[in-house]
Image (tube, helix red, strand yellow):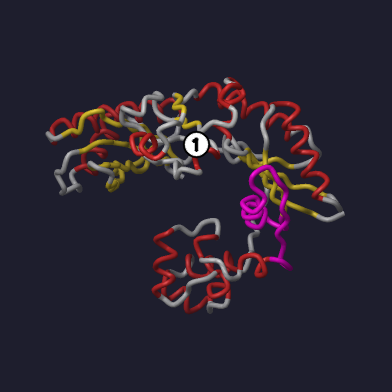
Amino acid sequence: MALWVLHVDLDQFIAAVEVLRHPELRGRPVVVGGDGDPAKRGVVSTASYEARAYGVHSGLPLRTAVRRCPDAVFLPVDREAYEAASDRVMATLRGFDAVVEVLGWDEAFLAVDRDDPEAMAQEIRDRVFAATGLDCTVGIGQNKLQAKLATGFGKPGGVFRLTRRTWFEVLGDRPTDALWGIGAKTAKRLKGMGIATVGDLAAADPGAMAEAVGPATGPWLVRLARGEDHSPVTDAPYVPRSVGRETTFQQDLRDWEDVRRGVSHLARRVAGDAAADGRDVARVIVKVRYAPFFTQTHGRALERPGIEAPRIEEAALGALDAFTDRRPVRLLGVRAQFAR
């Protein structure tokens, strides 16, 4: 038997749950976000494939989404419905002879001993659909990195295998941000160093990369480009590293005192969430999104970890003081990072 990692990713999960609840929407562009009113401020949580064809995607302002796809059906976020659907999916996955690591509402890793992982992948797809009516894609790899990236090549609703043998054939000529863990900023920095593709990064000297981008990050990027990942699949419960709250204002905040009051309110709510979790907070991060859509963050560490609301609020306001731009504000967020 061979050890394989399977990555199960539900297709257009939130939109798919809504279509199950409203079958008349099947085949139509569906956008889920905010309270479902595109005339109000909010962002897209997810969009159906039909809506994505018009350039609608997660994180896009709802007002932009309705301009791109005026015929879309807009629906409010229903967290409880998505959590219930996710619970049924994960219970189905735990019915297999595998170690299951849940990554979120709509994806999970499975570690399995199988000679034919494609057969198990198809069985997973069949069982999930039978239990929930939801479609999923399954990526197969020899480690979590390979399986996660394989899923992207199998979407929607397919099965794809990516291994050490096929890694460079599939990914070698692709840009570095095709890798799980490399974003646009890192890819731009790498390109400035003459590293444009996954193959370029894989061929880089780890020592030189350590000097260029950091002793830990540099070699890690090279290992990533080579398809190497030694992190185990674990069924240990997921423990969040932070808690946060944010709010989008229907009218921009132009008075900075209103901004301070907004941050104070969010900080007190986050402090309550942290107290309910029972873990000390070490650092508080404040997010400010200016009109029309430019976002900055600043953080402030607590002198010592704790859960006292006044101290968390004080740290949040201290972080807010680092913002020097006083342009109108459309969104505020406060996040508390737990002490390790």
Q: Is residue 236 above or below residue 160?
A: above
- Provide the residue designation for mark 1: 47
The x, y position of residue 108, in whole percent, is 65, 41
In terms of depth relative to the viewer, which is nearer, 266 or 338? 266
Q: Is residue 300 above or below residue 105?
A: below
In the image: residue 327, left or right of residue 142: left
In terms of depth relative to the viewer, which is nearer, 164 or 158? 158
Asked where in the image residue 153 lies, by quadrant, the reply is bottom right
Q: Residue at x 25, y 36 (%)?
A: 330
Q: Residue at x 78, y 47 (%)?
A: 112
Mark 1 crowdedness (10 Å alpha carbons): few <14, some 14-19, many ≥20: many
In terms of depth relative to the viewer, which is nearer, 162 or 114? 162
The magenta stretch spans residue 162: yes
For the record, the magenta segment spans 141-166
Q: Residue at x 62, y 55 (%)?
A: 149
Asked where in the image residue 266 lies, by quadrant, the reply is top left
Q: Residue at x 30, y 31 (%)?
A: 248
The x, y position of residue 89, in whole percent, is 68, 31
In the image: residue 200, left or right of residue 189: right
